[in-house]
Image (spheres, helix red, strand yellow):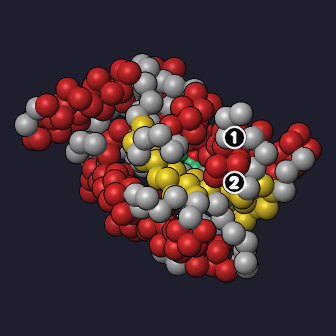
Amino acid sequence: MAESLRDRFGPVALVTGASSGLGKAFARHLAREGFDLIITARREPELTALAEELRAQYNVRCLVRTVDLSDARAVDTLLASLGEEEIDLLVSNAGFGTKGRFEADSLDTCIAMVNTNCVASLALCHHLLPGMKARKRGGVILTGSMEGEVAFPFSATYAASKAFLHSLGTALTAECEGSGVDILLLAPGPTDTEAPRKQGFSNEQLSGLMAPEAVVEGALSQLGRRSYWMPGWQNRLMIRMLKWLPRRMAARMAGAGLKAALKKSGRELV
Ligand SMILES: NC(=O)c1ccc[n+]([C@@H]2O[C@H](COP(=O)([O-])OP(=O)(O)OC[C@H]3O[C@@H](n4cnc5c(N)ncnc54)[C@H](OP(=O)(O)O)[C@@H]3O)[C@@H](O)[C@H]2O)c1
């Protein structure tokens, strides 16, 4: 009989950014697979409602931890609150972005984005990988973005923060070879969650928008098989074409595409 996801990577998974979108879909999928969960985000009511749903539906243990990952030391506090709990699968997924000119965001917002998108994943990997390696088993999923593959004008800090994760994930994959720990860098394209709306897009106007459940199912099926997964053939094709171009030309095209998508959503970038 084929080894289940829980047998291979369980029994305990920590999912960040579980109050909505991809994180919520990861938590639901993993609970269905029988994982015990620790779910985190800032919005407590959403997390509590999800925990109650998962406990009732799948009879799993589900701990809730509210945490603001824009604070660079938040991961220390989070892990201290978990005591001796062993985490076998890390889904480091929390993140946010903005769209607009670089200087339109305050420096505080840019730093909060880097802390949430990069520092939190770095800290979680730094704390949790040694234990996984010692036990010779474990899994890590880092949620990057297709924007981590090329520079995106009007999304400069976000794209750069995701490029950090892509590099980190690839390097850690090579370091962890033969250790029993599998790492997957997930690089989604547009996905039907709160994120595009928060960035000024109308989800209805975005082409190739994927369902979060499909992205999560794909990612979990690739963990242990590949180290990198970009869901959606249109996304893969677009990034392949952009990467074939000189870097500056690719960035210009990526920026123009982003501007056009925002315009379709009724937001003009000046
Ligand atoms: N949707 C897309 O098109 C898309 C494409 C590529 C990559 N991604 C990436 O996918 C990941 C999940 O995003 P999503 O699409 O599911 O969007 P989402 O629905 O907005 O979810 C983002 C999650 O991150 C959490 N989060 C944001 N800032 C946080 C902070 N300071 N501290 C703790 N938690 C925080 C949010 O929870 P609270 O607000 O409750 O804190 C929420 O649970 C992100 O890393 C995003 O960059 C998304």
Report if the beta carbon of the residue with label 2 is closer than 8 angstroms to ligand 1: no
Q: What amino acid type is highlighted by mark number 1?
A: Ser
Looking at the rendered structure, the secondary structure element under dot 1 is: loop
Q: Residue at x 79, y 45 (%)?
A: 34
> In the image, is residue 142 above or below residue 200?
below
Tell me which numbered mark, 2 or 1, is placed earlier along the sequence. 1
Residue 69 position, x and y percent, is 55, 66
- The reply to whether callout 2 and callout 1 are in contact (CB within 8 Å) is no
Task: Name the residue located 84 percent from the left edge and 56 percent from the top edge.
Answer: 61
Direction front: furthest residue: 1
Position of residue 221 relative to residue 266, above or below, is below
Q: Residue at x 14, y 31 (%)?
A: 244
State whether residue 100 appears in this view: no
The location of residue 186, given as percent across then percent down, is: 45, 43
Residues packed near mark 1 inside 10 Å, few (<14), some (14 to 19) or many (20 plus): few
Q: Is residue 224 left or right of residue 86?
A: left
**Of the residues shown, which amino acid type is indicated by label 2?**
Gly
Residue 24, percent across and down? 67, 43
Residue underneath mark 1: 4
| Residue 151 appears left or right of 190 | left
Circle number at residue 10 = 2
Residue closer to the observer: 244 or 131: 131
- Residue at the location (20% across, 26% down)? 241
